[in-house]
């Protein structure tokens, strides 16, 4: 029986890892695209399939309803090492409150390095220019009934590009359904599949950058809409709850200015893309963790280690994300401290 379990685990992880990688169209042409790049190592190692999981601080990035599972204060620090002089970091503090609810505070940062400035004729100006972007957020989640929880996240986005800066408010909404809770108590014990969850998330509602560019030689103003993400996800556990399996499907609805020079600026072209993510996590003694996944065709792997001392718990996670379209491989490291 033990041999069967090990073969099953290896088969699942190999299927996730051995799938063919495919070049894809990057969804980087809309405002705030940085918020979609996985920055937390556990979720990234599972291919970003986290809408139906979201049971730690990373839930603030995927499905705010999921963070209601957190029962202690948790501080999270994460960094994604990227090529082409790009930086991505994440800080979070989650604090449980009364009645199976929780409050989260987070900061997501993206930096794009420096490039040499040039004038309209293409000559170097001798000035180095850079760009950076931030997402400051407050999240709240509560389990209203045994079978479902709701969550929301209020975001303030800020971007600075050369001498221009802009800000915007956006809202994320999430729901998490605990399918086992709808069944008779104890009926799932001993079953092959347990802890079945379903999640729904809608992100970046009403978010847009309105640039005031009068006097810069550009149009007096320009509006860049954030893409709206509408996602569903599911997760379950098997092999005595040691193996977690998850999958997400997201619709990305983006609107861009019409490139037709004769069209009014406010005319928009709508682009809809589908994104599929899947992954798994296997735990050994609830102390060591192995992960693998596919993020829209891109291979991800990861590992984690949990260490308890006194009244606190330290969790160190690492993830690897394969090359997408010549950007190079990325490495993510995350530190969680529960106290």
Image: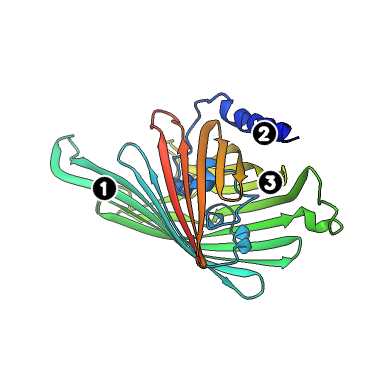
Residue at the image point whose x is 85% and y is 53% from the top: 187
SS for callout 3: strand
SS for callout 2: helix
Residue at the image point whose x is 71% and y is 68% from the top: 144
Residue 46 seen from this side: no
Residue at the image point whose x is 74% and y is 56% from the top: 178
Q: Disc 2 marks which residue?
A: 6
The correct choice, above or below, for 238 with respect to 26 in the image is below
Whether label 3 touches label 2, CB < 8 Å? no
Q: Disc 1 marks which residue?
A: 130
Mark 3 → mark 2, Cα distance in angstroms = 20 Å
Of 322 and 116, the residue lying toward us: 322
Residue at the image point whose x is 38% and y is 32% from the top: 327
The correct choice, above or below, for 138 with respect to 18 in the image is below
The correct choice, above or below, for 116 with respect to 131 in the image is above
Residue 332 seen from this side: yes
Position of residue 175 measured from the top left corner of the image (x, y, whole percent): 67, 57
Position of residue 111 measured from the top left corner of the image (x, y, whole percent): 33, 48
Q: Which mark is residue 235?
A: 3
Position of residue 75 measured from the top left corner of the image (x, y, whole percent): 46, 62
Position of residue 278 measured from the top left corner of the image (x, y, whole percent): 61, 38
Q: Residues within 10 Å of mark 3 (few under 14, many from 20)?
A: many
Mark toward the start of the polypeptide (1 vs 2): 2
Q: Residues within 10 Å of mark 2 (few under 14, many from 20)?
A: few
Say which of marks 1 and 2 sits in front: 2
Q: Which mark is residue 338?
A: none
Asked where in the image residue 215 lies, by quadrant, the reply is: bottom left
Mark toward the start of the polypeptide (1 vs 3): 1
SS for callout 1: strand
Mark 1 → mark 2, Cα distance in angstroms = 50 Å
Mark 1 → mark 3, Cα distance in angstroms = 40 Å
Mark toward the start of the polypeptide (3 vs 2): 2
């Amino acid at each position: 029986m033990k041999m069967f379990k090990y073969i099953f685990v290896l088969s699942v992880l190999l299927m996730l890892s051995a799938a063919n990688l495919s070049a894809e169209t990057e969804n980087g042409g809309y405002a705030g695209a940085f918020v979609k790049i996985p920055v937390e190592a556990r979720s990234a190692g599972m291919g970003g399939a986290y809408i139906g999981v979201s049971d730690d601080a990373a839930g603030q990035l995927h499905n705010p309803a999921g963070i209601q599972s957190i029962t202690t204060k948790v501080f999270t620090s994460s960094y994604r090492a990227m090529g082409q002089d790009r930086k991505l970091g994440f800080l979070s503090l989650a604090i449980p409150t009364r009645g199976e609810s929780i409050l989260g505070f987070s900061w997501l940062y993206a930096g794009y390095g420096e490039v040499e400035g040039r004038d309209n004729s293409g000559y170097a100006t001798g000035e180095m220019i850079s760009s950076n972007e931030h997402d400051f957020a407050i999240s709240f989640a509560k389990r209203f009934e045994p079978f479902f929880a709701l969550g929301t996240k209020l975001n303030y986005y800020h971007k600075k590009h050369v001498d221009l800066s802009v800000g915007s408010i956006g809202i994320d909404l999430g729901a998490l359904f605990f399918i086992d809770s709808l069944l008779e108590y104890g009926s799932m014990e001993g079953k092959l599949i347990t802890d079945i969850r379903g999640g729904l998330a809608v992100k970046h509602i009403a978010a847009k950058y309105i640039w005031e560019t009068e006097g810069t030689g550009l149009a007096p103003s320009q509006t860049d809409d954030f893409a709206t993400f509408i996602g569903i996800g599911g997760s379950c556990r098997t092999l005595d709850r040691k193996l977690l399996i998850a999958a997400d499907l997201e619709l990305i609805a983006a609107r861009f200015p019409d490139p037709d020079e004769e069209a009014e600026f406010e005319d928009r072209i709508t682009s809809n893309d589908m994104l599929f993510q899947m992954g798994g996590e296997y735990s050994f003694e609830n102390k060591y963790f192995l992960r693998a996944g596919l993020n829209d065709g891109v291979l991800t792997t990861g590992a984690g280690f949990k260490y308890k001392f006194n009244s606190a718990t330290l969790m160190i996670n690492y993830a690897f994300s394969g090359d997408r379209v010549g950007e190079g491989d990325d490495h993510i490291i995350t530190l969680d401290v529960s106290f």
